[in-house]
Image (cartoon, grey):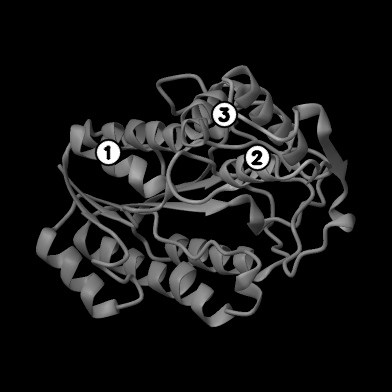
């Protein structure tokens, strides 16, 4: 089996690039090595390597900036994905792609399932949904993993920002009325590997979208408090404690792009396919936090 990995230097891509070569021959491209908006270069990369599985982690993820850079967001999250899907279908390869809870408006009071009707409320979410739709109509074998609040040890993310601010400020305010869970690149990678092994063993999961998050429910405020508590327990020098983090509403922290208040995703469909049980979000996040705080000791 041969795997082509795109976006190999991002939060998720970096973790996949560490793990995928352990299960199959893997050719990894970072953004500097392959711009996925360069259609001809992408076609040549796929046709020359002839992968069995294309794993695409390349994405435009600057949610607020996307409101001003709509064309670029769509070029990366939609148009380029259409090319990948077309080439996967042509090569007879599987396409594994990653999407987001931001395809939903957050108005539902219970977790979203894979069959709920999307209704994005920002450009980023709309561009990711467009990418999903191209894949679904391409006739390629595919798995779309929808996830939330990705936080890992690589790249820039919420955890690193909170820790940096906690070393510099004597007060910190974090939104407490957006509900979801943080998801680690390690968990997403483990699920991806489980799916690829199933393909390799001729027992591939049905094509389609799968919600991929750990179990439980949280808020950004609780995640921040959990992180600072772990940092305190590990003697990271901080200017504030977990109890000092103020809870604020989304309305009190306006941003260029609207965010869904409900980012909860139902994972029963995924759990029926997995060879392992999904962890609780605190267990998943604690492992990430332990790695991230090393930078601040």
Circle 1 sits on which residue?
18
Disc 3 is placed on an element classified as: helix
Is residue 227 in view from this perspective?
yes
User: In the orientation shown, which residue stands out farthest toward the left?
Assistant: 48
Crowd class of label 2 (few under 14; some 14 to 19; many from 20; radius 10 Å): some
| Residue 30 picture location, percent across and down | 29, 60
Disc 1 is placed on an element classified as: helix
Crowd class of label 1 (few under 14; some 14 to 19; many from 20; radius 10 Å): few
Please tell me which residue is depicted at 19% across the width and 38% down the height of the picture. Answer: 21
Please tell me which residue is depicted at 14% across the width and 58% down the height of the picture. Answer: 50
- 273 or 35: which is nearer to us? 35
Please tell me which residue is depicted at 56% across the width and 24% down the height of the picture. Answer: 286
Asked if the residue under mark 1 is in contact with the one under mark 2, i.e. CB atoms within 8 Å, the reply is no
Horizontally, is 276 left or right of 254 in the view? left
Instruction: Say whether disc 2 or disc 3 marks the residue closer to the N-terminus.
Output: 2
Horizontally, is 192 left or right of 44 in the view? right
Residue 247 badge: none
Estimate the spatial distance between the alpha carbons at disc 1 and disc 3, rounded to whole Å. 19 Å
Is residue 23 in view from this perspective?
no
Q: Nearer the viewer, mark 2 or mark 1?
A: 2
Q: Is residue 170 above or below residue 131?
A: above
- 93 or 228: which is nearer to us? 228
Circle 3 sits on which residue?
285
| Residue 273 picture location, percent across and down | 44, 29
Q: Quadrant of the N terminus?
A: top left
Instruction: Say whether disc 2 or disc 1 marks the residue closer to the N-terminus.
Output: 1
Asked if the residue under mark 3 is in contact with the one under mark 2, i.e. CB atoms within 8 Å, the reply is no
| Residue 94 picture location, percent across and down | 29, 51
Circle 2 sits on which residue?
167
């Amino acid at each position: 089996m041969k795997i082509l990995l795109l976006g190999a230097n991002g939060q998720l891509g970096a973790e996949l690039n560490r793990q995928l070569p352990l299960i199959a021959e893997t050719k990894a491209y970072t953004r500097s090595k392959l711009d996925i908006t360069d259609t001809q270069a992408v076609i040549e990369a796929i046709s020359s390597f002839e992968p069995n599985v294309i794993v695409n982690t390349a994405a435009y993820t600057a949610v607020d900036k996307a409101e001003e850079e709509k064309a670029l967001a769509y070029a990366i999250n939609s148009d380029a994905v259409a090319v990948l899907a077309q080439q996967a279908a042509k090569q007879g390869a599987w396409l594994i792609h990653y999407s987001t809870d931001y395809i939903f408006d957050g108005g539902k009071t219970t977790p979203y399932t894979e069959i709920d009707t999307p209704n994005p409320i920002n450009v980023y979410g709309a561009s990711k949904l467009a990418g999903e739709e191209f894949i679904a109509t391409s006739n390629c074998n595919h798995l779309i993993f929808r996830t939330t609040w990705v936080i890992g040890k690589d790249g820039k993310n919420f955890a690193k920002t909170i820790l940096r601010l906690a070393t510099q400020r004597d007060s910190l305010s974090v939104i407490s009325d957006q509900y979801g869970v943080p998801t680690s690149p390690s968990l997403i990678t483990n699920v991806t590997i489980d799916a690829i092994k199933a393909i390799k063993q001729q027992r591939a999961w049905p094509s389609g979208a799968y919600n991929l998050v750990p179990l439980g429910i949280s808020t950004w405020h609780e995640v921040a408090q959990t992180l600072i508590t772990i940092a305190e327990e590990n003697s990271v020098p901080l200017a504030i404690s977990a109890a000092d983090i103020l809870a604020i509403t989304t309305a009190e922290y306006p941003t260029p792009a609207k965010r869904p208040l409900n980012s909860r995703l139902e994972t029963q469909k995924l759990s029926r396919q997995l060879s392992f049980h999904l962890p609780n979000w605190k267990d998943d996040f604690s492992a990430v936090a332990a790695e991230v705080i090393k930078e601040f000791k």
